[in-house]
Image: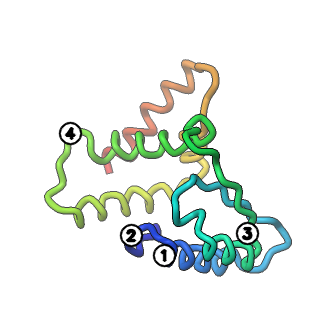
Amino acid sequence: MWNEGACNTEHTVQFLTHLAGWLGSTDLSTIIIWDGAPWHRSKQVQRTAADLGFIVIPLPGYSPDLNPIEGRVSGCVKMLLTQHHCYTSMRHLFNACKAFVDRSYQNPVAVIQRLWPKFELDLDYEKLLVSWEHQFRDQ
């Protein structure tokens, strides 16, 4: 989990550099799809991304339909971590989020399947979601 202060140009450049190191050398293209946050559009970030070999595709403004997973992730986190619970400090909330991310990394395929946008209702699948949510809530 990346937590290096406020979202700004400097930290975004650091993130890109960290990401490039984590990905290592590869012949595959890395595509980053970003919203229109000012730090994503900055010339320094764009230049760093290009220098590191990333392809940056900006989302058009006011287009949440093109980024449906963001709402699903925040909704999932809100439901599993903050529903009926008030943390006593930002550090406690951060620790809960970090633990959630760490548990998610243990089974990334399940997370992807859970968060992938669905365009039709499958009742058997929906029943499975309830058991998946309890798996993370009870830990």
**Rendered location of residue 84, percent (x, y):** 20, 39
Q: Rounded to the nearest whole Å, what is the CA distance between mark 3 and mark 2?
A: 22 Å
If you read the primary sequence from the N terminus, does the residue marked by circle 1 or circle 4 appear first?
1
Q: Are marks 2 and 4 in contact (CB under 8 Å)?
A: no
Q: Which mark is residue 11?
A: 1
Quadrant for residue 79, please give it. top left
Mark 1 crowdedness (10 Å alpha carbons): few <14, some 14-19, many ≥20? some
* Residue linked to disc 4: 84
Q: Amino acid at mark 2?
A: Ala
Q: Is residue 65 left or right of residue 100?
A: right
Q: Amino acid at mark 3?
A: Phe
If you read the primary sequence from the N terminus, does the residue marked by circle 3 or circle 2 appear first?
2
Mark 3 crowdedness (10 Å alpha carbons): few <14, some 14-19, many ≥20? some
Say which element carries label 4. loop
If you read the primary sequence from the N terminus, does the residue marked by circle 3 or circle 1 appear first?
1
The correct choice, above or below, for 45 with respect to 107 in the image is below
Q: Are marks 3 and 1 in contact (CB under 8 Å)?
A: no
Q: Residue furthest right?
A: 27
Say which element carries label 3. strand
Which one is closest to the eye, mark 2 or mark 4? 2
Q: Rounded to the nearest whole Å, what is the CA distance between mark 3 and mark 1?
A: 17 Å
Q: Amino acid at mark 1?
A: His
Which one is closest to the eye, mark 1 or mark 4? 1
Q: Amino acid at mark 4?
A: His
Q: Rounded to the nearest whole Å, what is the CA distance between mark 1 and mark 4?
A: 33 Å
Q: Which mark is residue 37?
A: none
Say which element carries label 2. loop
Mark 4 crowdedness (10 Å alpha carbons): few <14, some 14-19, many ≥20? few
Mark 2 crowdedness (10 Å alpha carbons): few <14, some 14-19, many ≥20? few
